Image (spheres, grey):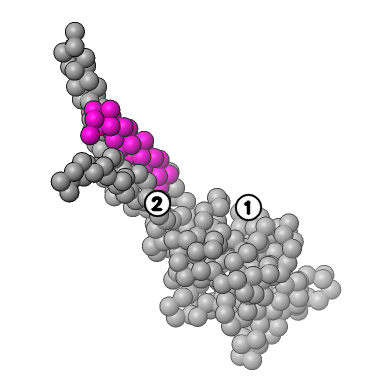
Amino acid sequence: MSITSAMFTGVSGLLNNGESMNVIGNNISNVNTIGFKGARMLFSDMLSQNIGNNSQIGRGMQIQKVENLFGQGSFETTENVTDLGIQGNSFFALKPPTAAAPVATQNAAFLSRAGAFHVDNTLTLVNPDGYQVLDTQGNPIKFSNTGAAPTTDFSKIVKIEPNGLITYLAQDGITTLYYNTSGAAGLPTTPINAGTVQRLAVVSAADLSGLEKAGGSLYKATATSGVPAVAFTLAGNQPNGTSEKVLSNSLEQSNVDMASQFVKMIITQRAYSANSKTITTADEMTQEILNLKR
Protein backbone atom coordinates (compact mmCIF):
# COMPACT_ATOMS: atom_id res chain seq x y z
CA MET A 1 0.00 0.00 0.00
CA SER A 2 1.40 3.36 -1.00
CA ILE A 3 2.05 6.22 1.39
CA THR A 4 -0.79 8.14 -0.31
CA SER A 5 -3.14 5.26 0.49
CA ALA A 6 -2.03 5.46 4.11
CA MET A 7 -3.08 9.09 4.13
CA PHE A 8 -6.53 8.26 2.76
CA THR A 9 -6.86 5.51 5.37
CA GLY A 10 -6.12 8.06 8.07
CA VAL A 11 -8.61 10.48 6.52
CA SER A 12 -11.35 7.83 6.70
CA GLY A 13 -10.63 7.49 10.41
CA LEU A 14 -10.71 11.27 10.91
CA LEU A 15 -14.01 11.80 9.12
CA ASN A 16 -15.86 8.87 10.63
CA ASN A 17 -14.64 9.42 14.18
CA GLY A 18 -15.74 13.02 13.76
CA GLU A 19 -19.24 11.77 12.92
CA SER A 20 -19.09 9.46 15.93
CA MET A 21 -18.37 12.50 18.10
CA ASN A 22 -21.53 14.09 16.69
CA VAL A 23 -23.58 11.07 17.82
CA ILE A 24 -22.03 11.21 21.30
CA GLY A 25 -22.62 14.95 21.51
CA ASN A 26 -26.28 14.47 20.54
CA ASN A 27 -26.68 11.83 23.25
CA ILE A 28 -25.20 14.11 25.90
CA SER A 29 -27.26 17.11 24.78
CA ASN A 30 -30.44 15.04 25.24
CA VAL A 31 -29.59 13.59 28.63
CA ASN A 32 -32.57 15.48 30.13
CA THR A 33 -34.97 14.97 27.21
CA ILE A 34 -38.09 13.04 28.24
CA GLY A 35 -38.37 9.70 26.44
CA PHE A 36 -35.13 10.18 24.49
CA LYS A 37 -33.35 7.07 23.26
CA GLY A 38 -29.60 7.27 22.75
CA ALA A 39 -27.69 6.04 19.72
CA ARG A 40 -24.32 4.49 18.97
CA MET A 41 -22.07 4.51 15.94
CA LEU A 42 -21.16 1.16 14.41
CA PHE A 43 -18.09 0.96 12.16
CA SER A 44 -16.92 -1.57 9.61
CA ASP A 45 -13.70 -1.94 7.66
CA MET A 46 -13.47 -1.08 3.99
CA LEU A 47 -12.61 -3.54 1.21
CA SER A 48 -9.01 -4.61 1.68
CA GLN A 49 -6.36 -4.60 -1.06
CA ASN A 50 -4.89 -7.94 -2.15
CA ILE A 51 -1.10 -7.78 -2.34
CA GLY A 52 -0.43 -11.43 -3.21
CA ASN A 53 0.50 -14.53 -1.23
CA ASN A 54 -3.00 -14.56 0.34
CA SER A 55 -2.25 -11.24 2.02
CA GLN A 56 -4.45 -8.19 2.28
CA ILE A 57 -3.94 -4.66 3.52
CA GLY A 58 -6.84 -2.69 4.95
CA ARG A 59 -7.97 0.52 3.28
CA GLY A 60 -9.55 2.20 6.28
CA MET A 61 -12.96 2.22 7.93
CA GLN A 62 -16.49 3.37 7.22
CA ILE A 63 -19.74 4.02 9.08
CA GLN A 64 -21.83 0.87 9.12
CA LYS A 65 -24.88 2.23 10.95
CA VAL A 66 -26.03 4.72 13.55
CA GLU A 67 -28.10 2.43 15.76
CA ASN A 68 -30.76 3.73 18.15
CA LEU A 69 -30.74 2.06 21.57
CA PHE A 70 -34.22 1.48 22.98
CA GLY A 71 -33.34 0.33 26.49
CA GLN A 72 -35.84 1.27 29.20
CA GLY A 73 -35.16 4.61 30.87
CA SER A 74 -35.85 5.31 34.53
CA PHE A 75 -39.15 6.86 35.62
CA GLU A 76 -39.66 10.18 37.36
CA THR A 77 -42.75 10.53 39.54
CA THR A 78 -44.80 13.66 38.84
CA GLU A 79 -47.96 15.32 40.11
CA ASN A 80 -49.82 15.25 36.77
CA VAL A 81 -52.10 12.30 36.09
CA THR A 82 -51.62 12.85 32.34
CA ASP A 83 -47.84 12.42 32.62
CA LEU A 84 -47.45 8.90 31.26
CA GLY A 85 -44.68 6.39 30.82
CA ILE A 86 -44.67 2.94 29.23
CA GLN A 87 -43.15 -0.08 30.90
CA GLY A 88 -42.27 -2.31 27.97
CA ASN A 89 -41.25 -1.80 24.35
CA SER A 90 -44.38 -0.17 22.93
CA PHE A 91 -44.98 3.46 21.97
CA PHE A 92 -47.70 6.04 22.34
CA ALA A 93 -49.44 6.74 19.02
CA LEU A 94 -49.93 10.37 17.95
CA LYS A 95 -51.01 12.41 14.94
CA PRO A 96 -50.54 16.05 13.89
CA PRO A 97 -53.54 18.25 14.71
CA THR A 98 -54.07 18.96 11.00
CA ALA A 99 -54.13 15.31 9.91
CA ALA A 100 -57.39 13.52 9.22
CA ALA A 101 -58.89 11.16 11.77
CA PRO A 102 -58.94 8.31 12.27
CA VAL A 103 -55.35 7.42 11.41
CA ALA A 104 -55.84 4.72 8.79
CA THR A 105 -53.12 2.30 9.86
CA GLN A 106 -50.79 1.87 12.80
CA ASN A 107 -47.68 2.46 10.70
CA ALA A 108 -49.07 5.87 9.65
CA ALA A 109 -49.03 7.22 13.22
CA PHE A 110 -46.17 9.05 14.87
CA LEU A 111 -44.70 7.05 17.74
CA SER A 112 -43.23 8.39 20.97
CA ARG A 113 -42.04 7.38 24.41
CA ALA A 114 -42.36 10.94 25.72
CA GLY A 115 -45.63 11.02 27.66
CA ALA A 116 -45.82 14.62 28.93
CA PHE A 117 -49.44 15.06 27.85
CA HIS A 118 -52.19 17.51 28.79
CA VAL A 119 -55.79 18.27 27.79
CA ASP A 120 -55.90 21.38 25.59
CA ASN A 121 -58.65 23.96 25.08
CA THR A 122 -60.44 21.68 22.61
CA LEU A 123 -60.56 18.95 25.29
CA THR A 124 -58.08 16.83 23.32
CA LEU A 125 -55.18 14.98 24.93
CA VAL A 126 -52.01 16.34 23.29
CA ASN A 127 -48.25 16.50 23.73
CA PRO A 128 -46.41 19.84 24.21
CA ASP A 129 -46.20 20.32 20.42
CA GLY A 130 -49.93 19.82 19.93
CA TYR A 131 -49.72 16.29 18.50
CA GLN A 132 -52.90 14.44 19.44
CA VAL A 133 -52.76 11.20 21.42
CA LEU A 134 -54.70 8.37 19.74
CA ASP A 135 -57.15 5.89 21.18
CA THR A 136 -57.67 2.26 20.17
CA GLN A 137 -59.78 3.34 17.17
CA GLY A 138 -57.01 5.57 15.79
CA ASN A 139 -58.95 8.71 16.77
CA PRO A 140 -57.64 11.53 18.96
CA ILE A 141 -58.58 11.17 22.63
CA LYS A 142 -61.12 13.96 22.83
CA PHE A 143 -63.66 14.59 25.59
CA SER A 144 -67.16 16.04 25.42
CA ASN A 145 -68.47 19.17 27.15
CA THR A 146 -71.83 20.32 25.82
CA GLY A 147 -72.37 22.79 28.66
CA ALA A 148 -75.78 21.26 29.34
CA ALA A 149 -75.01 17.82 30.80
CA PRO A 150 -73.17 18.24 34.13
CA THR A 151 -73.23 14.50 34.87
CA THR A 152 -71.34 13.60 31.65
CA ASP A 153 -69.56 16.79 30.55
CA PHE A 154 -65.79 16.60 30.98
CA SER A 155 -64.08 18.32 33.90
CA LYS A 156 -60.68 16.63 34.31
CA ILE A 157 -58.92 13.28 33.99
CA VAL A 158 -58.63 11.61 37.39
CA LYS A 159 -57.13 8.21 36.53
CA ILE A 160 -55.34 6.36 33.74
CA GLU A 161 -54.96 2.67 34.45
CA PRO A 162 -52.04 0.42 33.37
CA ASN A 163 -54.25 -1.06 30.61
CA GLY A 164 -54.96 2.39 29.15
CA LEU A 165 -58.43 2.83 30.62
CA ILE A 166 -59.16 6.54 31.20
CA THR A 167 -61.47 7.81 33.94
CA TYR A 168 -62.61 11.42 34.07
CA LEU A 169 -64.62 13.54 36.49
CA ALA A 170 -67.82 15.14 35.23
CA GLN A 171 -68.76 18.80 35.67
CA ASP A 172 -70.96 18.02 38.68
CA GLY A 173 -67.77 17.22 40.63
CA ILE A 174 -69.16 13.86 41.75
CA THR A 175 -69.73 11.56 38.78
CA THR A 176 -66.81 9.65 37.29
CA LEU A 177 -66.98 8.13 33.81
CA TYR A 178 -64.84 6.13 31.42
CA TYR A 179 -63.59 7.80 28.26
CA ASN A 180 -65.63 6.13 25.54
CA THR A 181 -64.95 7.34 22.01
CA SER A 182 -63.52 10.52 20.53
CA GLY A 183 -65.78 13.53 21.22
CA ALA A 184 -68.52 11.45 22.85
CA ALA A 185 -69.86 11.49 26.39
CA GLY A 186 -68.28 8.96 28.71
CA LEU A 187 -69.87 5.81 30.13
CA PRO A 188 -70.47 4.95 33.80
CA THR A 189 -67.56 3.27 35.55
CA THR A 190 -68.98 -0.22 35.73
CA PRO A 191 -67.24 -3.56 35.09
CA ILE A 192 -69.31 -4.08 31.92
CA ASN A 193 -68.28 -0.76 30.39
CA ALA A 194 -64.63 -1.27 31.36
CA GLY A 195 -64.35 -4.05 28.81
CA THR A 196 -65.95 -2.23 25.90
CA VAL A 197 -64.82 1.41 25.97
CA GLN A 198 -61.89 2.66 23.88
CA ARG A 199 -58.55 3.22 25.58
CA LEU A 200 -55.19 4.89 25.17
CA ALA A 201 -53.52 3.16 22.23
CA VAL A 202 -50.01 1.73 22.16
CA VAL A 203 -48.16 0.48 19.07
CA SER A 204 -45.37 -2.08 18.89
CA ALA A 205 -42.55 -2.49 16.38
CA ALA A 206 -41.08 -5.90 15.58
CA ASP A 207 -37.67 -4.34 14.81
CA LEU A 208 -37.05 -1.25 16.92
CA SER A 209 -33.84 -0.46 15.05
CA GLY A 210 -35.93 0.10 11.93
CA LEU A 211 -37.74 3.13 13.36
CA GLU A 212 -36.78 6.53 11.97
CA LYS A 213 -36.36 9.59 14.20
CA ALA A 214 -38.70 12.42 13.20
CA GLY A 215 -37.65 15.07 15.75
CA GLY A 216 -39.62 16.24 18.74
CA SER A 217 -39.11 12.85 20.47
CA LEU A 218 -41.16 11.24 17.68
CA TYR A 219 -40.48 8.23 15.49
CA LYS A 220 -41.89 7.10 12.16
CA ALA A 221 -42.35 3.53 11.00
CA THR A 222 -40.32 2.30 8.04
CA ALA A 223 -40.64 -0.76 5.83
CA THR A 224 -38.18 -2.64 8.05
CA SER A 225 -39.57 -1.64 11.46
CA GLY A 226 -42.38 -4.19 11.43
CA VAL A 227 -45.08 -1.81 12.66
CA PRO A 228 -48.37 -3.38 11.50
CA ALA A 229 -49.94 -1.82 8.41
CA VAL A 230 -53.43 -2.50 9.79
CA ALA A 231 -56.10 -0.39 11.47
CA PHE A 232 -56.16 0.29 15.20
CA THR A 233 -58.30 -2.10 17.26
CA LEU A 234 -59.32 -2.33 20.89
CA ALA A 235 -57.96 -5.86 21.14
CA GLY A 236 -54.67 -5.20 19.36
CA ASN A 237 -53.61 -1.80 20.65
CA GLN A 238 -54.45 -1.64 24.34
CA PRO A 239 -51.63 -2.28 26.84
CA ASN A 240 -51.90 -5.81 28.21
CA GLY A 241 -51.37 -4.60 31.79
CA THR A 242 -48.71 -7.22 32.58
CA SER A 243 -45.50 -7.05 30.54
CA GLU A 244 -46.72 -3.81 29.01
CA LYS A 245 -48.12 -1.10 31.28
CA VAL A 246 -48.99 2.56 31.10
CA LEU A 247 -47.72 4.31 34.23
CA SER A 248 -49.64 7.43 35.23
CA ASN A 249 -47.96 10.27 37.16
CA SER A 250 -44.67 9.11 35.62
CA LEU A 251 -42.32 10.26 32.87
CA GLU A 252 -39.65 8.09 31.29
CA GLN A 253 -36.29 9.78 31.41
CA SER A 254 -33.59 9.64 28.75
CA ASN A 255 -31.76 6.30 28.68
CA VAL A 256 -28.43 8.04 28.08
CA ASP A 257 -25.79 7.19 30.69
CA MET A 258 -23.60 10.26 31.10
CA ALA A 259 -20.56 8.40 32.46
CA SER A 260 -20.40 5.92 29.57
CA GLN A 261 -20.84 8.73 27.03
CA PHE A 262 -17.85 10.60 28.46
CA VAL A 263 -15.76 7.43 28.29
CA LYS A 264 -16.78 6.99 24.63
CA MET A 265 -15.95 10.64 24.01
CA ILE A 266 -12.41 10.18 25.31
CA ILE A 267 -11.90 6.98 23.28
CA THR A 268 -13.22 8.65 20.13
CA GLN A 269 -11.03 11.70 20.65
CA ARG A 270 -7.98 9.45 21.05
CA ALA A 271 -8.86 7.60 17.85
CA TYR A 272 -9.28 10.93 16.05
CA SER A 273 -5.85 12.08 17.28
CA ALA A 274 -4.23 8.76 16.29
CA ASN A 275 -5.60 9.01 12.74
CA SER A 276 -4.37 12.57 12.55
CA LYS A 277 -0.94 11.31 13.55
CA THR A 278 -1.14 8.67 10.79
CA ILE A 279 -1.65 11.39 8.20
CA THR A 280 1.17 13.50 9.63
CA THR A 281 3.58 10.55 9.66
CA ALA A 282 2.68 9.57 6.08
CA ASP A 283 3.30 13.16 5.01
CA GLU A 284 6.71 13.16 6.71
CA MET A 285 7.61 9.91 4.94
CA THR A 286 6.61 11.48 1.62
CA GLN A 287 8.89 14.43 2.34
CA GLU A 288 11.77 12.05 3.08
CA ILE A 289 11.29 10.34 -0.29
CA LEU A 290 11.20 13.69 -2.10
CA ASN A 291 14.41 14.74 -0.35
CA LEU A 292 16.16 11.58 -1.60
CA LYS A 293 15.52 12.68 -5.21
CA ARG A 294 17.28 16.01 -4.77
Dividing the picture into quadrants, the one containing residue 69 is bottom left
In the image, residue 57 lies at what x, y percent?
22, 41
Q: Which mark is residue 65?
A: 2
- Is residue 38 shown above or below 276? below
First in sequence: mark 2 vs mark 1: 2
Q: Residue, x 21% and y 14% (percent of image)?
A: 290
In the image, residue 275 lies at what x, y percent?
26, 33
Pick whichever, 94 or 171, lies toward us: 94
- Mark 1, Cα crowd under 10 Å, few <14 / some 14-19 / many 20+, is few
The secondary structure type at the circle numbered 2 is: strand
Type of amino acid at the residue the image marks with label 2? Lys
The secondary structure type at the circle numbered 1 is: loop
Left or right, 85 with respect to 260, comes to right
Question: Which residue, as the protein is rendered here, is positioned at the far right?
Answer: 148
Q: Which residues are magenta?
A: 1-27
- Is residue 251 shown above or below 56? below
In the image, residue 84 lies at what x, y percent?
52, 65
Q: Which mark is residue 99?
A: none
Asked whether the beta carbons under mark 2 and mark 1 sit within 8 Å of each other, the answer is no
Q: Residue, x 82% and y 71% (percent of image)?
A: 146
Q: Give the labeled residue for mark 1.
A: 129
Q: Is residue 229 magenta?
A: no
User: What is the quadrant of the N terminus in the image?
Assistant: top left
Left or right, 21 with respect to 203, comes to left
Q: Residue, x 55% and y 56% (percent of image)?
A: 218
Type of amino acid at the residue the image marks with label 1? Asp
Whole-angstrom CA distance, mark 2 to mark 1, is: 30 Å
Question: Which residue, as the protein is rendered here, is positioned at the far top?
Answer: 294
Left or right, 213 with respect to 54, comes to right
Which secondary structure is most common in the magenta stretch?
A: helix
Dividing the picture into quadrants, the one containing residue 61 is top left
